[in-house]
Structures are given as structure tokens and as C-alpha cells.
Image (cartoon, coloured by chain):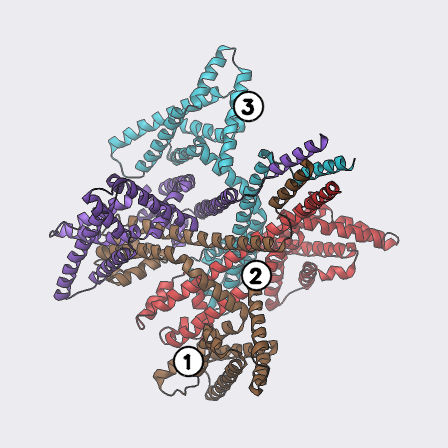
Chain colours: A cyan, B red, C brown, D purple
Amino acid sequence: MRVIINSGSTEMTKFDKSIDKNLITSKFGRLQRQFYSIRNNKMFELFVISIIIFSALMIGANSYQVSATTYQVLSVLDITITVIFLIEIIIRFIGEPNKKRFFHNAWNVFDTFIVLVSLIPIEDSELAVLGRLVRIFRVLRMVSIIPELRILINSLVKALPQLGYVMLLMFIIFYIYAAVGTTFFAAINPDLWGDIAVSLLTLFRVMTFEDWTDVMYETMTVYSLSWFYYLTFIFFTAFAFLNMVIGIVVNVLEQERQIEADLLKKDSDEPSMKELKQELAEIKALLQK
Amino acid sequence: MRVIINSGSTEMTKFDKSIDKNLITSKFGRLQRQFYSIRNNKMFELFVISIIIFSALMIGANSYQVSATTYQVLSVLDITITVIFLIEIIIRFIGEPNKKRFFHNAWNVFDTFIVLVSLIPIEDSELAVLGRLVRIFRVLRMVSIIPELRILINSLVKALPQLGYVMLLMFIIFYIYAAVGTTFFAAINPDLWGDIAVSLLTLFRVMTFEDWTDVMYETMTVYSLSWFYYLTFIFFTAFAFLNMVIGIVVNVLEQERQIEADLLKKDSDEPSMKELKQELAEIKALLQK
Amino acid sequence: MRVIINSGSTEMTKFDKSIDKNLITSKFGRLQRQFYSIRNNKMFELFVISIIIFSALMIGANSYQVSATTYQVLSVLDITITVIFLIEIIIRFIGEPNKKRFFHNAWNVFDTFIVLVSLIPIEDSELAVLGRLVRIFRVLRMVSIIPELRILINSLVKALPQLGYVMLLMFIIFYIYAAVGTTFFAAINPDLWGDIAVSLLTLFRVMTFEDWTDVMYETMTVYSLSWFYYLTFIFFTAFAFLNMVIGIVVNVLEQERQIEADLLKKDSDEPSMKELKQELAEIKALLQK
Amino acid sequence: MRVIINSGSTEMTKFDKSIDKNLITSKFGRLQRQFYSIRNNKMFELFVISIIIFSALMIGANSYQVSATTYQVLSVLDITITVIFLIEIIIRFIGEPNKKRFFHNAWNVFDTFIVLVSLIPIEDSELAVLGRLVRIFRVLRMVSIIPELRILINSLVKALPQLGYVMLLMFIIFYIYAAVGTTFFAAINPDLWGDIAVSLLTLFRVMTFEDWTDVMYETMTVYSLSWFYYLTFIFFTAFAFLNMVIGIVVNVLEQERQIEADLLKKDSDEPSMKELKQELAEIKALLQK
């Protein structure tokens, strides 16, 4: 973990360097430098975080029955938050030395999109729901602001492809069992086994052990051997899942060891056995002269 | 994981070599070589995979209520898929340099069986179900086509015997508890404890924590101390299960370390401590002359 | 695992040695030697295992409704099994070179006890249940016969004291929550919170997530903040449980590494760095002469 | 674990030293020394532990319906226990060489607080509940008395900040899903989705798989695609949880290895490769002279 956070700080250093190179001359450059220092200011970050928390609390407050006055206060506060977020994004954008780079970062795009959409005034009840959703997703800005969370999410996303084949295998198991389930049990309970989509959902339910015996006992009244279907399904999915977890643990441990081994190799000025042997060979040559 | 996939690619190389040796002369040999190159073609693999996915989607579509026209279209498509699969198997078989080897591979046998059975025309409603099942199991061909999935399954199957004794122990625990449960609780609820098979199923349900308290509260009305039976059962099975998981994790980590240690030994041209000592002894001998 | 099984085989060797020393002269000694070789015979072991499996199947058969004739057949078979087990124990006992050692082994005591109790003829319905239970526990003889299972059980039992303090901590958490639960919720639902014993059982149910929300929603109607009680309980127990599991994993990995390190030290005839330094010092001394 | 317990014993040694320095002269010093030796006496510790167990049993007994006589006996016993605890705390306090240090230890503060509060005579029914609660928390004194438990709790508390960011991420996931859930499902079932607090509780329930399909099926009657909401929630939380567990395992293994590596470095008098190279360089210099 420490290593990952270090890589985060080196990213910062890169920014500093690119500033030094490009923009010290012009007037706009001075503004940019100023905004860049604001953006990297710890106080500014804390201020934005507290605004995000405040907006989260407002979403929570909105979920309760509120009086008309409170509602008006909340509306005004909402506009204020939107404006603050807009200013913050503008500061970030101007403060960015490399404008193209700004939109290469997915988090910046997400931030900009959320802020722009929440600017649109909404009256229509249809759009009102959308407006509320956008306000809720503003809480996700927490992740884009706090570097540790951003890193955590990135490492989670990076771990996903590793799981690819086990996931595919699991889906094949699910699909085959769902198809078999639909073939045999659709007539017994169409709500649970009516078509392949519903069967997949029912099987997911069985995997989480959620009232799975109710599902089983029902089909056992018709096919008394159908317990075999459920037990094999549970065994297969449990086995695949276990395999996935163990795979991740082993991978993470391997990576940690690799990082450590690399550090050891780089940092140490310890001579290798090969070098020692070389030295010995030279001594021997001296003696045999 | 990487290591396992590497072993997959060496397998390929072996095939290439056996081709070079055996069959360059005859006319059939040329056909075989041609089909072999088709078989190993990435495009051919992708085409077969997409056909399998298409056949899986058709199974899904079949689970919904379909109009008569759609049904006829689906029937024609099904025949087309069967024919494509048949051609594919024939290409594979002719392309295989060593015909005996072909049927030594369990996946090839499975593929051939599934394709041959789906050729049989089915009218009878009894056999219709079987026909549908065979079509569903065609989705499993995904595993036999994609090498990574095949390797994954093989490694899972290899891991099974390791678990043998813990599984046996777990079954003994289940069996004893089921026998005791039947002895005492059969009169209370025959549906759950009527005979040893039903009791085993009920105990499996208790192990998955699925409404286990309902089962317990019922027997506690007669035997108020029967909570002891359930709690000890949960402890024993949880303990055995935990042991099994830890056993697998430790084994996998050991294997990884073994592989790494072997790689280190083989690849490195680093002299051993023993060699260095030998060198020193020689130097000493030179000095003492 | 491999190491543990090895230790099992060394145990065998010890027996062989003790035989060589003590009893080659007398006539009884010859009988003992003969029985000892029977006892260690693989065929004899397989025969006993198949009898145990057969007796397990009979227990299963007994749990179904059987006709009078079948019942009589089963009774005769039961007597046969009991006699076979008696003979087997006698062979084992006579075959044991050191009679005192025989009863120091808990599994031998268990075997003898089970066989002796099943000799008692039972007519009374009260004792009949006891007789059936003893017959069920004969299945456990499987563990005492198969060395791998015996070793597995032993290693599980050895792992228990390690868990001692975490178990104690968990019990303290349970006890405090049960006492608090009884104080507040006894009036709401005496069946779940009536006294401390019932509350402990209810909390175990909550820990397994078995319909725990039903329990919570009921108390929330009176104490609307009681969700805090359940959530903290779940967090504490989950955290303690996780800690326990991680503790076991780390311990097992440590042991494996220790065993490996010891093997490396013992087997290797590689000189240490210290030895090399000593050699160098001697060479230097020779040069400076 | 062994290492941690060792650190506990070094703490003890520190105490012994501080005694030697400060207080051998005065009369009070002699008393203090006497009490200090009582405090560290194994018998005294066992006595206090047995009193705590006895008080725990009394709490249990109180939860059952008791006769008037028993109640009076229990009351007298309760006063006795309180007095014993008071004396014990006084012995501890006087026995402590450094009075300021005494209250720096959170466990001592907890002990003193619990004992002092249980001294207050309670008649009022409102306070009676508080009195009972304080008596229950006396069981926690077990943790403050047994060093191993104290160490276990300390190490658990130290592990918490590590989990900080994953916990925060999980809370953000929960909060966003709760806000979305309230927006859409509040009208369907206000008991489960009425406001943000209730929604959070419902989502925790979904995470524990407790009748989560009942919750889902209900909302699916209105929004038929709401299964997507539940499945993504389960995936996200399961993934974050898995990540947390793996993080802890890796951290614990890393720490163990670090401790071992440090021990190896400190204890060993093995020369480094660098030292050997130095030696070789000197020999070469001697030869080239």
C-alpha cells in the first residue's frame, strides 16, 4: 500500500516539473500558477471535502419530510453548493498546466459532467428525478478528491481483468444451470424459473443461500431428485468462488514479494556471489603467476 | 497462473514438432497440415466461439414464449449450428496428426459426443427433453475451445484429491449427525428427519444457515437441549471447512514458492557457497605449496 | 501435510523396533508377532473399513420403514458385525507389543468402549435408544482405522488451544450482549430474550445472520435505537472471527516455513558465510607470514 | 503472537525498575512495595478473575425468575463483590509506583469508573437499569485483568486505522445506494426505504443476505429492472469487503516477515557479502605487493 501511495506523490512531482517548463512568462501563466498552488493547497482540499460532506448531508435531509421553509433553505443551499463546485472545477481547469491532460483523467471528466448537469434548471417532474440522481452522485466526488480513495478504486479496477476467466467460468456454470432449470422447473413456478433471465436471478439467490431450501422443496415435490441440481450448483459455484479468492490472495502476495525483491536488488550495494567468484579467480591467477 | 498458461503454449509447440516429423509426404498429409493450420488459426477459434455464444443465446431465446414463425427460424438456425459444429469436429479430427491422441483428450470425446447426439432427429416428447439438454451442454464447448478455461478446469480437478480426506471427515460428521437426528427427531418432523437421506439434506441446510433456527426451535419444543446438537454440528463443520480452505491456500502458496525456487535454481548461473569454498581451498593449497 | 504423514510412518517404524527387542522368544511372542503382522496388513485394514462402511449403511437402512423379514436380517447382520469388531479388537490387543501403550492411545480406548457396549443385549426401549447411538458412533471407528483421518483430527485438536483467548474474548462479547439484551428486551419477547441462556442462543442466531432482522425489527418497535445494539454486535463478532481465521492462516504458514527452514539447515552441506570468512582469514594469515 | 506477549513482559520489567529507583526509603514506600507485590501476585490475579466470573454468573442468575430469599442473598453478594472490587482497585492504586501513570492507562480508568459507579446506591427504577448495566460491564474487567486479552484488544484497535479508507469507501457506496434507494423505493415500502437512515439499515440487511430477495421482489413489482440495483450493490460491497480481508492478511504476513527479518539481522553474527568482498580486496592487495 505504501508503495502505491508513493507512486501518487511522484505524479505530483511530475506536475511541478511541467509547470516549471511551460508557463512562467505570460500573465495567464501567472494566474495558472496561482490557481495551481490553490488546487494543491491542503486547506482548499479540506474545504471542498467539507462541501461534499455537507451536500451529502443535504441529500440525507431531503429524504425526510421537510417543512416548506426548510425546503426553500435547502434549495438555496443547493444552488450555493452547485456554484462552489463550478468555481472549484474552473480553478482546477485553469490551474492545470496541460489542458489536454485534464480531460484524459477520467475523474476530471466525471467531475465536470456532474457539475455541468447539476447547472441545468429542472422543473419537469421527469427530469426532477434525474436532477436528484446527479446530486447524489456528487458524493462520488469524494473519491475524485481524496487521493487514497482514488488509488484504492484504481487498484480495484486493475484487479478485475485478473478475475476474467474465473468470472467467465462462473457465468457458464450459471447459464447452463439456468437453462436446465428453465427446461424442467418453468412449469412448477414460472415466477422463479419462467425464462432464462429469471432463472439466473433465482440461481444467484440460491448462491447467496437466501431461502434456497424454499426453492428446492418446491421443485422436489415434482422432481424428487432435484436436490442433486441444487447441491451440485452450490458446490460448483462455491468451488469457483473459493478459487477466485485464493487466486487474488496469491497474486497480491506475489506482487508484494516482487516489489520487495526489486527494492532489495536496486537499493543494495551488496556484491553478488558471481562477483566474489570473479575476485577469487583473479587472486588465483595472481598466485599462479 | 502465468506459469500454467506457459505450459499450455509448450503443448502447442509439441504438436508442431510431431507434424514436422510424421506427415509431410502424402496427399492426405497435405490436407491434414492444412486443417491443422485452420484448427490453430485464431480466426477459426473466434468463429467457433461466436457460434457457441450464438447457440447459447438461442437456448435463452427458446426459454421465452415465441411465435410460430420465430420457432421455425430457431429450428433452422439450430440445424445450421449443428452442421457447423459437425464440420468443425471433422476439421479438428483430420487436422490432428496423431489420431489416437485425439480421443485420449477427454474434451475432444465430450465435443464429439455432444455433436453426434445433437444430430439424432427427435420427435418424441420424451427424447425432446434430452435433445434440449444436449443443446444446453453445447455451451460447455466454450470450455473445450478456450485454452485458459480448459486449464482452469484441469487445475480445479487436480485440486480435488487434495481435499479427499477433509471431505471424507466432513461426510462422517454429516452421517453421524444425520443418524442421531433421525433417531431422535424423526417423530417430530418426518419431512425434515424422516430417514437418513432427508436428514443429510436438512443438515446441509443447517450448514448453509438457511432458516436453521426454524429447524432447531421445532425440535427444542420436545428436546429442550437439542440446541447442543445444532451448535456442535455448526462448530464441527465450520472448523472442518475452515481447515479445508486454509489447507488449499497453504498448498497453493507452497506450489508457487516451489516453482519460483526451481526457476531460480535453473536460470541462475550464480555459483553456490560450496563452489566458493572449493575455490578458497585451492587458493590455500597454492599458498601452502 | 506430507510432513505430518511422514511422522505417521516413523511411528510405525518405532513399533517394529520395539517388537524386535522384546518378544521373539516365547510362544505367546510368536502369536503376538503374527497378530501384529495381521494388524498392519493392508488387506486387514481394508476389510475392517468395509465392515465399518457396511455397518454405516445398515444404520442408514434402519432409518427407513422396513418389513419384518428385513428387520430380522438386519438384526443378524448387526450381531455379525459386533462379533467381527470384537475379534478385530482382540487381534489388535494381542498384536500390540506393549500392552500398557494400547490403552494410552485414546482411539484404542474409544474403539474398545464402543465394541464392549454394543455387546450388551438391549430389550428395554429406554436402553434401545442408547444401543442405537452406540451403533451410530461405530462409524467414528473409520477415523481410528484410517491413519490420515486420525492425524487430521489430532492436528485439529492441537489447533484448538491456539484459539483459546480469541474464543474467550468472543464469549465475553456474547455474555455482555446477552446480559444487556435480557435487561432491555426480555419484556418484548421472552422466547428470544427471556433469560441469559436463551439470549445467548438468540445472539448466536444473529451472528449467523439467520432472520436477524426479524429479531431487530421487533425490538425496534419499542427501542427505536436498538439497531445500534445489533450492528455493533455483528461488527465485534465478525472482527473477532476474522482475527481468529487470519491468526490460524498466519500460524500454519509460519509452521510450514519453520519446517522448511529446519529441513534446509539439516540437509544442506553448504558452508555458512562465517565458514567462508574463517577460510579467508586463514589465507590472509598465510600471506602475511 | 509470541512476540506481542513478550512485549507485555518487558512492560512489567519497566515497572520493576521504576520501583527500584523511586521508593525504598519511606514507610509509605514500604506499603507501596508490599501492595505492588500483591498486585503482581498470580494468586491475587486468579482471585480477582474468579470474583469477576462469580459476578458474571450472578448477572446470569438475575436474568431468571428468582424467589424473594434468593434475591436478598444475591443483593448481599452484589455488595460483597462491589467492596472486594473497591479494595482491589485501592491496592492497585497504592501499589502503583507512578500515580500519574495509573490514570494514563485507559483500562485502569475504566476499572475505577465501573467500581465507583457501582458504589452509588440506586433506588429509582430509572437508575436501576443503569445500575444493572454497570454491573454487566464489570464482566469487561476480565479483559483488563488478563494481559493476553488486553494485548489482543490493543492489537485489534491498532488494526482499525489500517482499514480506514476501505471503510470510508464502503460507507460512500452505502450512502449513494441508500440515497438512490430512498428516491425510487420510498413510495413502495416506507418501512424499508422511508428515509436515508432506514435505507442504510435495509442495505446492511441486503449485504448480510438476510431475506434480501423479499426486499428485491417487492421493488421489482414496480421497477422490474431494480434487480440491477441489488446485484451491483452486492458485487461492490462483496468486492470491497474481500479487498479489506486480503489487505489485513497481507499486512499481518508482512509484519511477521519484518519481525523475523529484523531478528535475523540483529541476532546473527554472519558476515555480509560486502565484508567478504572487503577481505578478498585486502588479500589481493597483499598479493600484489
Disc marking residue A100: 3
**Above or below — where is A157 with respect to B36?**
above
Residue B267 lies, in percent from the top left, at 69, 45
Q: Residue at x 65, y 65 (%)?
A: B122
What amino acid is at disc 1?
A: Arg
Of marks 3 and 2, the one in the foreground: 2
C-alpha gap between disc 3 and disc 2: 61 Å
The earlier-in-sequence mark between 1 and 2 is: 2
Q: Is residue C122 left or right of residue D132?
A: right
Q: Is residue B262 left or right of residue A246?
A: right
Q: Residue furthest left?
A: D123
Residue D223 lies, in percent from the top left, at 42, 46
**Above or below — where is A193 with respect to A266?**
below
Q: What chain does mark 3 sit on?
A: A
The residue identified by callout 2 is: C3
Rendering quarter of residue C39? bottom right
What amino acid is at disc 3?
A: Lys
The residue identified by callout 1 is: C132
C-alpha gap between disc 1 and disc 2: 39 Å
Residues tagged by mark 1 and mark 3 found on one chain of the structure: no
Q: Residue at x 56, y 54 (%)?
A: C262
Residue C61 lies, in percent from the top left, at 48, 79
Residues tagged by mark 1 and mark 2 found on one chain of the structure: yes
What amino acid is at disc 2?
A: Val
**Label 3 crowd bin: few (<14), some (14–19), many (20+), radius 10 Å:** few
